[in-house]
Image (cartoon, helix red, strand yellow):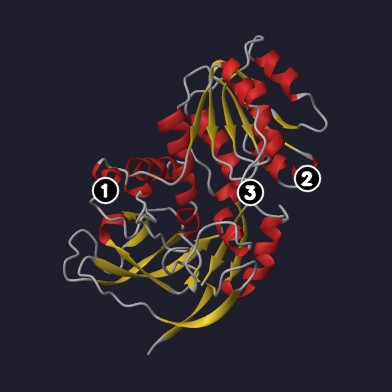
Amino acid sequence: MATMKALVKTAKGVGHVELQDKPVPVIRGGDEVLIAVKAAGICGTDIHILHDEFPYWPPVILGHEFSGEIVEVGPQVTGFKVGDRVIGEPHTRACGKCYLCRTGNRQICPEKRSPGWGIDGAFAKFIVMPEVLLHRIPEGMSYDEAAVVEPAANVFQDVLLRTRVDPGDVVVVLGPGPIGLMAAMCARLGGAKAVIVAGTNRDEELRLPTARKLGFDQAINVQQQDLPALVTQLSGGRGADLVVEASGAEPAINQAVQLIRKQGRIAVIGMTGKPQIAFKWDAAIFRDCRIDFHISTAFECWDRTLAMAASGQLNLKALISHREPLEKWKTVFEDVEAQRGLKAILIP
């Protein structure tokens, strides 16, 4: 039996991640394809699984952000062929029968078991995916950039398709990590007149400078600059129209309520990794604001994100800080967790 190196969460608990030899997966359903993984991105979810802070079913190969080339197709596959360059939505094993699936929301089906936590994922040489979840990589887009489309599609959906940006909005993004920087780019795409990217002292080395290189002049350190005063100035005293919470930090989550205008919108993307936090509930009530929680991706955002990335309007390449072989996973994980990196790509 052919084998491959794979990064496996072997058991429940903190740690228990190691490289192992695993069997090369085989196509079992007629509608499946076998993909040779060319690039796989490290997600915050992978870090949470390492620390036992996200649901998962071990032993399981980690990784759900990937790009690759089809090397084998099942007999019922009609829309793709060997040699096609693809990415895949991580919505495997959705039941197709529940009210969520039947209303077009398979991404939050309770039976879903996505690659990387529910079933074997992409931190390996090969992965099997059903045809229905595949998208072609546009000509001219690298495998590395394509591997970053999954998190970008999340942000595109959250900021532009669900919570929305209106032309002329003042937008604040709390947390200048990869998700926050993607959110800032999406806010600019949506026509915001001002986008403030807010970080802290530990973001000064890499994240805030990257925001400035991406053209966000209002990329500020909240430990050195008065964020509420800046929002007041740029909004004419009204408050931000939209706050994107991308940090998952309790102080920032509560500051979102302070910064938003009455009847403004808060897009919640950052995960805390904690069972609960203290939140200023009544303050949010008096703001009369809308708070949208988000997880995963629906079909529409994928092709839109691919188109925006292929055109250069979403600069995903600028967010890639690491490109290393799978064998160096531990060092790269440590760099990402310590904020010494943005989007990190592992090459199986």
Position of residue 167 relative to residue 341, above or below, is: above
Q: Are marks 1 and 3 in contact (CB under 8 Å)?
A: no
Residue hosting label 3 = 274
Residue 224, image x, y percentages? 83, 31
- Secondary structure under the numbered disc 1 in the rendered image: loop
Tag 3 and tag 2, C-beta contact below 8 Å: no
How many C-alpha atoms fall within 10 Å of the one at disc 2: few (<14), some, or many (≥20)? some
Image location of residue 256, percent across then percent down: 64, 28
Residue 100 rendering spot, x and y as whole percentages: 30, 44
Q: Which amino acid type is shown beneath numbered disc 1?
A: Cys
| Whether residue 43 can be seen here | no
Residue occupying image coordinates x 17% and y 71%: 75
Q: Residue at x 62, y 45 (%)?
A: 272
Quick one: 11 or 171, which is closer to the camera? Answer: 11
The answer to whether 27 appears left or right of 189 in the picture is left
Mark positioned earlier in the residue sequence (3 or 2): 2
Q: Work out how far the residue at label 1 is from the one at label 2, CA to CA, in angstroms.
A: 44 Å
**In the displayed structure image, the side of residue 215 where residue 62 appears, left or right:** left
Q: Which numbered marker is on residue 202? A: 2
Dividing the picture into quadrants, the one containing residue 49 is bottom right
| SS assignment at label 2 | helix
Amino acid beneath label 2: Arg
Report the residue at 46% width, 36% height from top: 158
The mark found on residue 98 in the picture is 1
Q: Point out residue 24 in the picture as x, y percentages from the top left corner.
A: 39, 80
Can you tell which quarter of the image residue 182 is in? top right
Q: Nearer the viewer, mark 1 or mark 2?
A: 1
- The answer to whether residue 255 is left or right of residue 105 is right
Between the C-alphas of marks 3 and 2, the distance is 21 Å
Label 1 packing within 10 angstroms: few (<14), some (14-19), many (20+): some
